[in-house]
Image (cartoon, rainbow, N blue to C red):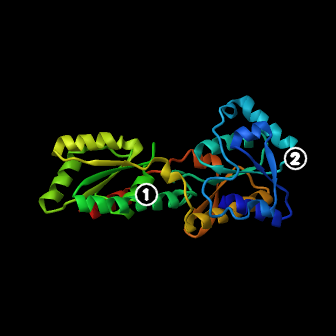
């Protein structure tokens, strides 16, 4: 919503007429456009989700669907498209660009898995949500001297789990990018208990394994009774953090500026304090690896 607000108001400030598309590519195929004014995006910067709503569009996955989407934009005299989303949304955007549509992408995914940007919109909020949950669980873990397994989202990437683990002071973080060794985890837990440690938190990205399966394996190994909390979609909502609002606002304005300058097929990103733009095909062909320095730091701090 913060990015949408910035797109609308920057566009209007540059003398543009701005439209929103309801329900993503599904709405594009249906021609579900709505005119947006300055007041249309008032009082939304603090709201999670999107006032335009979104949907996974099976129809848009076909060449015929993309052809229709491009035709809808031409028919509505849309001169530039801003796509706010992740990998799937951007792959659709590239196909539209191949058909002559001018478009710029804004990265929005709690996974923070896109290259050429330090952060994607939603990541910081999701991390804070995860850390708050860990803080609350730690109170119970400490009082009852228990080991808790906390499963975060992250089907293919562990950036979210790793950030939650480091910021939340977890004893172990499991991510999809690296092998899971239950014996090593048990040895670490046993070593901690031997020196008097009474509680532990284990963070598991969903792609690294089910939190319940990990708990069962540890229980079998150590004879302990573990508790499991699956954060799930709780991480995808709520009031966005100030940091997310800031980068979303800057990205939205930057996207409009790029379109106004005649640029296309780019993704806006943040590098340090600067807004940058990278060709979308390069973004999609470059995988963002897990930060091994941060992962090793998590291991060093969990003692």
Most foreground residue, 266 or 67? 67
255 horizontally vs 179: left or right? right
Q: Could you classify mark 2 by the number of other residues whose Cα lies within 10 Å: few (under 14), some (14-19), or many (20 or more)?
A: few
Residue 120 occupies quadrant: bottom right
Work out whether residue 36 or residue 248 is closer to the camera in this orientation and state it: 36
Is residue 276 something that shows in the picture?
yes
Residue in the foreground of this view, choosing between 212 and 175: 212
Q: Identify the image quadrant of residue 170.
A: bottom left
Query: Which residue is at the front of the view, 219 or 272?
Result: 219
State left or right for residue 216 relative to residue 86: left
Give the residue drawn at x 42%, y 62%.
Answer: 132
Q: Residue at x 80, y 64 (%)?
A: 38
Looking at the figure, which quarter contains the N terminus? bottom right
Q: Which tag, 2 or 1, sits closer to the chain's start? A: 2
Residue located beneath label 2 in the image: 77
Q: Position of residue 254 (x, y in %)?
A: 70, 63
Which percent across, then down, holds residue 122? 55, 57
Marker disc for residue 130: 1
Q: Which mark is residue 295?
A: none
Judged left or right of residue 40, residue 171 is left
Where residue 107 sits in the image (x, y, percent)? 61, 54
Vertical placement of 50 versus 11: above or below? above
Find numbered disc 1 in the image and state the secondary structure of the residue it sits on. helix
């Amino acid at each position: 919503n913060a990015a949408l607000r910035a797109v609308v108001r920057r566009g209007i400030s540059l003398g543009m007429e701005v439209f929103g598309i309801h329900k993503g590519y599904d709405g594009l195929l249906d021609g579900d456009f709505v005119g947006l004014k300055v007041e249309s995006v008032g009082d939304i910067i603090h709201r999670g989700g999107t006032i335009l709503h979104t949907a996974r569009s099976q129809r848009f996955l076909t060449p015929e669907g993309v052809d229709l989407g491009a035709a809808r934009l031409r028919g509505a005299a849309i001169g530039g498209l801003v796509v706010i989303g992740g990998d799937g949304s951007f792959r659709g955007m590239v196909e539209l660009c191949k058909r002559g549509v001018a478009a710029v992408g804004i990265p929005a995914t709690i996974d923070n898995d896109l290259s050429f940007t330090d952060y994607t919109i939603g990541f910081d909020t999701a991390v804070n949500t995860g850390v708050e949950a860990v803080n609350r669980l730690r109170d119970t873990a400490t009082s009852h001297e228990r080991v808790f397994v906390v499963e975060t989202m992250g089907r293919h990437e562990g950036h979210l789990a790793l950030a939650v683990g480091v910021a939340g002071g977890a004893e172990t973080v499991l991510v999809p990018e690296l092998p899971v060794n239950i014996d090593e985890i048990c040895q670490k837990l046993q070593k901690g208990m031997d020196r008097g440690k009474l509680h532990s938190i284990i963070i598991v990205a969903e792609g690294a394994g089910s939190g319940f399966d990990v708990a069962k394996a540890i229980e079998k190994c150590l004879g302990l009774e573990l508790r499991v909390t699956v954060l799930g979609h709780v991480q995808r909502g709520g009031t966005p953090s100030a940091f997310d609002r800031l980068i979303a606002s800057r990205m939205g304005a930057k996207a409009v500026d790029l379109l106004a300058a005649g640029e296309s097929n780019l993704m806006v990103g943040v590098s340090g304090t600067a807004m940058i733009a990278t060709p979308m095909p390069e973004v999609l062909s470059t995988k963002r690896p897990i930060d091994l320095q941060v992962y090793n730091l998590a291991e060093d701090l969990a003692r």
